Image: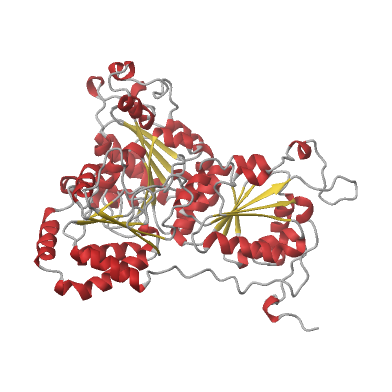
Amino acid sequence: MAADPDLQEPGDVDVRTCAEDVLYLLGAHGVEVLFLNPGTDSAPIQEAAATLAERGVPQPRIVACSFEAVALAAAHGYWQATGRPQAVWVHVDAGTQNLGAMVHDVLRDRAGVVVLAGRTPYGEGPDDPGGRDSAIHWQQDVPDQTGILRGYAKWTAELVRSEDAPRVVGRAVQVAGGGVPGLAYLIVSRDVLMQPAAARGRRRLAGWARPHPPGLAQAAVDEIAGMLAAAERPVLVTTRIGRHPGGAAAVTRFAELAAVPVIGRPEAFNIASDHPLFRARHDEAAVLLGQADVVLVVETDVPWIPRSTQLAPGARVVHIDPDPLHTSIPLWTFPVDVAATADGALALGQLADAWERLRPVSGAGWEERRRLLLTAGSGSGAARDAAGSGSGAARDAAGSGSGAARDAAGSGSGGRGGGDGTGAGGARALRAEDVLRILAEAVEPGDIVVEEAVTNAEIVATCLPRSLPGTLTSAGGPGLGWALGASVGLRLALPDRRVVAVVGDGCFMFAVPTAALCLAAEAEAPFVAVILDNDGYRASRLPVFSLFPDGTSAAAREAVGTRFRRPPDFAAVAEACGALGRTVADQAGLRDALVAAFAAVADGRSAVVSARVERD
């Protein structure tokens, strides 16, 4: 009987075990990096990596990671840069649990990642290859390992037979990156990994197509374009459309053609931060939403906060999203009058095309609206003027990599500003706005800014201008501690670009900085981290004051559990990991530290600049 031509293996690949097959297949399906956190279950994978390298068989690059959450954040960052799923290996149930809140970020950001996890071996006899040989193999045998991720993973499976490896691995990568991307979770025991590889001729690499992103049906285009043409005060709300190729260009073209202001927390670069149609400030966004007669919501989970923002009576809401029902959010109940399943970038392109046809009959109201919007500016003009275009001298010095620049900034960790990080007279000389404006002088237009500043996110958007697509990103989800690992993934994917993470002091600690800086060194992917250090959890303190404005906490101007009495010396942590560390409390010190930080990165070394900013 003739072999099925659709299942033929291309070429003569010397793959002998299931583990070797898994590694080869991952690479063949486009996985370039496997972030590995090894354990007792990964031995077949480790041996397979060595034997494949010896035989010259292609496989993903394997990068050792000392903590699982950092590994997943790195894979997530790589996805953001490329749109290609990468892989993470974790140790059975314990390693799966250590992925932590990063799985939430993958879910909310719709990132494509393949997580492979070992599981307790099945065999326990002396003649069972890879069988149980330690007490831990019984202790880690849990009833539902997959259930750890069930609420967050897009797809789960177990590889139970070596002969199924081509089907299962192909399916994992296909599902992770196709449709609405997500986390594919595949478990496999080491005794299965030690089985002989699938028979030759049964390894299918072709035919794993991922769906093209959907566009709007013509009826939807006509309906939505008609609503916009009749609108007097439309507004566009989007947060992550810039993740898509051409997304930022689509937002800009549509907004300019239709004279529509753009609002929404920028989880990606959606439109230039100094574009006159972009409204970065929350108070401006609330006013626009309260006046709008048509609200166009495109690819955003939370278009407004109903508790503090009310739409105008009679306002109509149009919602465009690959999943407009947001089925992973049980109580997503925002009012929607027209919903459409479509890729946001494609849909805005279609609407822009339709608007070009409709504009001649749209009336004088559109011309006046366009004139007013384009002359009013974004409301952050003062911030842009203060930031300027960036000092060329500062950028030149920062990128020079000269040892003299580092020497000028001083050596060692720099301490914590004399013990308390305060300036003259005991008052801190830095505000978060100051830090971002000075950082704006040092970054290049092509540098990638990774934002995890939480309550200072708006300040990043208004004080650190970004003018090029792909130069601003964030986790897109609620799991804190993402930015450092993601910075490594972004730098791995884009080795010629500088990466700067802007984080709070709480986020820096959540990120397991020792593991993240170790990963950056191992992967040769250095980055700069700038910490807005206000000695505590501001995001957890403000709700106490808001919910209890007349309470004891508000009167004392403190909230239990939100202030670090004895925080770590972040610069010393960086130095202990082989990175450059600086602590600064004034503007001159910050400028010098940034020069040293970018010089360190040019020399292949990560850098951490801890800026002691004023407390709220």
In the rendered image, residue 15, in percent from the top left (x then y), is placed at 74, 66
**Closer to us: 44 or 142:** 142
| On-image quarter of the C terminus | top left
Q: Quadrant of residue 309?
A: top left
**Closer to us: 144 or 329:** 329
Q: Quadrant of residue 12?
A: bottom right
Give the answer, above or below, for where 388 lies relative to 141: below
Answer whether residue 244 is visible to the viewer in this image: yes
How many marks the image carries: the answer is: 0
**Residue name at image x 33 percent, y 29 percent:** 542
Answer whether residue 91 is visible to the viewer in this image: no
Give the answer, above or below, for where 287 lies relative to 298: above
Q: Is residue 384 left or right of residue 124?
A: left
Name the colouring of the figure.
secondary structure
In the rendered image, residue 180, in percent from the top left (x then y), is placed at 48, 60
Q: Is residue 43 left or right of residue 156?
A: right
| On-image quarter of the N terminus | bottom right
Q: Quadrant of residue 550?
A: top left
**Residue name at image x 39 percent, y 69 percent:** 215
- Outermost residue toward the bottom in this view: 2
**Residue name at image x 69 percent, y 57 percent:** 49
Q: Is residue 175 left or right of residue 46?
A: left
In the rendered image, residue 364, in percent from the top left (x then y), is placed at 9, 66
In the rendered image, residue 284, in percent from the top left (x then y), is placed at 20, 45
Give the answer, above or below, for where 458 lies relative to 177: above
